Image (cartoon, coloured by chain):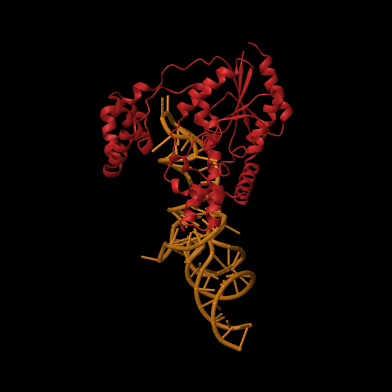
Chain colours: A red, B orange
Amino acid sequence: MNTLVVLLGPTGAGKTELSLSLAEFFHIPIINCDSRQLFRDLKIGTAAPTPDEQKRVKHYFVGTLALDEYYSAAQYEIDVMKLLQEQFQTKPIALLSGGSMLYIDAVCKGIDDIPTVDSYTRQMLQDRYAKEGLENLCNELQQLDPSYYKEVDRCNPKRVIHALEICKMTGKPYSSFRNQVKPQRPFQILKIGLQREREELYKRINARVDKMIENGLIEEVKRVYPYRSFNSLNTVGYKELFNYLDGEWTLDFAIEKIKQNSRIYSRKQTTWYRKDETIIWLNPDDIDNIRNIITNKLMNKQ
RNA sequence: GGUGCCAUAGCUCAGUUGGUAGAGCAUCGGACUGAAAAUCCGUGUGUCCCCGGUUCGAUUCCUGGUGGCACCA
């Protein structure tokens, strides 16, 4: 049976390095699974694979999008499934590497078929949220989709607004699109989680941020400054330096905030992964062991 | 050396007219399905600097000490 190896873990754990080594060992490309490395102008701040690294190993989904392009976990699922279908015709193994939790789940578990919100509806709900406030929108959601209203986090504008967008746009309750049949994947999945002591992880994250600054992150941020309102730039490493460029924060403070927000992000990732009992947690430095586990899985033909 | 002010959570500080204490930030935990590095929720036992005194009871008042800051020499 074909095997998808998923290499995941918190930011800064060492996925990029290990994925290169594994890809070379198994002679396969890397399917990147990082929702921000997708954007072509966010190289330094997202620690995207460098041109040299991309010469060593073919990468998919790195630098493929412009900052103003729309993308989603659902689209990622479609794109990756198509790619996998092609790759499995000639190779029994594929490597997906990255830390975007929702994107990983979209590929491994599938994501419900919910319509994409058109820009008119999105703008209309944004305007109403600004004018009427969250409570009114909640009340309307209660009318249009009582079932989802019961379970939604009513303090979270994005959730409430999105549900309303779908209700308004389709004329059907948002919940009617959810919890559809889980797809059966035509391959087996091996999830390997890279684990480090938190103290060590934090040190690596902090050091990496300093390195990004040395490598010219501030220049990169200046270049994308005109596009700061795009969702793609609501990203750790960029939003903090926008505040610096605006004169609201000192550079040192902005750098500390980047480190801090990166640490927080790494914890959120860990929280998400904890629920997934199929992840095998391994030490990133133990490459031999990781290779063996993958090889064993490949030979296990069920 | 003298005088004054300060010492409370990891940090910045509030507060207790004497009944052992609380904010912001940090930290940590959680949620999450088509914008997800996003968005949202929750989380505070700390020798109240140390020794002694007054008191039923002191982090609070008093004596002394230690450390910091300011001013005067």
Toward the viewer: B33 or A282? Answer: B33
In the image, taking residue A161 as reference, residue A102 lies left or right, namely: right
Q: How many marks?
A: 0
Q: Is residue B26 above or below residue A76?
A: below
Residue A179 point in image, percent of width and height: 41, 21
Residue in the image at 70% along x and 30% along y? A21
Q: Quadrant of the N terminus of chain A?
A: top right
Of B34 and A205, nearer the camera is B34
Could you say where residue A243 lies in the image, as x and y percent from the top left? 47, 53
Residue farthest top in this picture:
A302
Residue at 30% in and 37% down: A125
The answer to whether any part of residue A177 appears in the image is yes
- Quarter of the image for residue A286 reads top right
Can you see residue A195?
no
- Point out residue A299 in the picture as x, y percentages from the top left corner: 69, 14
Towards the viewer: B55 or A289: A289
Quadrant of image for the C terminus of chain A: top right
Left or right side of B56 for A280: right
Residue at position x 65%, y 43% in the image: A200
Q: Where residue A101 sits: x, y (%)?
A: 52, 31
Q: Is residue A286 left or right of residue A116?
A: right
Q: State the image quarter where residue A48 is shown.
A: top right
Asked which quadrant contains residue A57, the reply is top right
Above or below, A54 against A235 in this view is: above
Q: Furthest-right residue in view?
A: A288
Rendered view: B25 above or below A110? below
